[in-house]
Image (cartoon, helix red, strand yellow):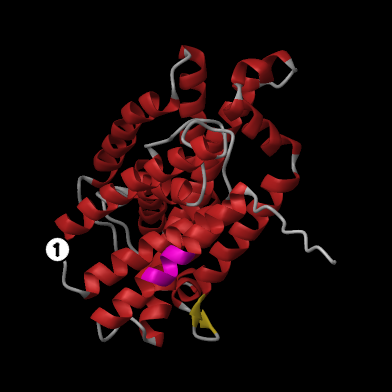
Amino acid sequence: MRYIRIRKLKKEEKNGIMVLAGILAVSILFSCTTATFATGANFLRLLRQMVIMIIIATGMTFVVSTGEMDISVGAIYNLAVNVMALLTLHTGLSPWLWAPVGILIGAACGGMNGVISTSLGLPAIIITLGTSYVYRGATFVLTGGYSVGNLGKSTFFDFGTGAFLGVNNTVYVALFVVAVSAWWMKRSVVCREFLAIGSNANASRYTGVPVKGRKIQNEVLMGGFAGLAAVLSLAFMASATSEGGSGYEMLAITAVVAGGGSTEGGSASVWGTLGGIALIMIIKNGLMLMGMSTAYQEATEGFLLVFAIAMQRLMHKRTG
């Protein structure tokens, strides 16, 4: 008699199946309850709307892998996009020149988060709660609370609003960033040390891992991702608002957890995060098409975060 060996699914594969099942279920639901959800135009619009959150959530994946959470990313993103817009407006120079500045601003803010957190020995979530107000305050001072627009014409904006094969150019940038990040997380020693720190920081320290240095590096990386998101946002919108980026941090954390990342650290997947953000944005899009108010949409997002954490904890207990 011939026996067939059934391979046991890994935890990451189980998470992936759950996320895909969730995406399929909500897609069927909204296809049946709205007339415009299952259309090509809505699909292309949804892809474009996902770009900023894909970038920020990818950065958050690295942060969560170390057992930390950064809730200043929305404020960092907003500061970077407004600084780039103001520089473009007041200098008259091409926004292409200011794109690296936006990324550097994000990385610098992230670095400050990391240095303060590791110097004081406090969790990043506590420090970034405070610095988020600092970054938003700085944005308000720079802009006076007004939106920044009328930035003129540029190939930078042409690229942001342009499309290839019907898909917005920024979508390709986001997917490229995801692919590179997923490869780097799987192959690099640095990312293995991120995960080791999340699993057991003390044990990692005893084995020679520079825990403080890696945490600072992680925050710099997160800030850089927020800065890159700001670049893509400015390229598409050709403007900036003083209140942008609000709630982005919670969406990013929810996506990471929904994609299999552990809030305690030691487990995270870039591809899983991509699935998580797709699930969340599909739900947001469907609720909007159903005419649900913003307040109810935010309540739903909060429920999703709690549900994702609860499911992650349940799976963690079952797998030991």
Looking at the image, the residue that sits furthest to the front is 1
Label 1 sits on a secondary structure element that is: loop
**Up-down relation of residue 201 to residue 296 (above or below):** above
Res 214 visible: yes
Is 23 a magenta residue? yes
Q: Which residues are magenta?
A: 21-25
User: Taking 54 as reference, is 188 left or right?
Assistant: right
Answer few, some or many: residues within 10 Å of disc 1's Cα (few below 14, many 20 plus, some between 14 and 19).
few
In depth, the one of 320 and 38 nearer the eye is 320
Q: Position of residue 185 (x, y in %)?
A: 67, 46
Res 104 visible: no
Taking the spot 84% from the left edge, 66% from the top edge, the residue there is 2
Taking the spot 37% from the left edge, 37% from the top edge, the residue there is 71
Is 162 a magenta residue? no
Q: Position of residue 47 (x, y in %)?
A: 44, 72
Q: Amino acid at mark 1?
A: Ser
Task: List the residue tagged with mark 1.
Answer: 293
In depth, the one of 148 and 45 nearer the eye is 45
Q: Position of residue 145 (x, y in %)?
A: 20, 47
Q: Position of residue 240 (x, y in %)?
A: 31, 57
On-image quarter of the C terminus: top right
**Up-down relation of residue 123 to residue 46 (above or below):** above
Looking at the image, the residue that sits furthest to the right is 1
Q: Quadrant location of residue 91?
A: bottom left
**Up-down relation of residue 212 to residue 142 (above or below):** above
On-image quarter of the N terminus: bottom right
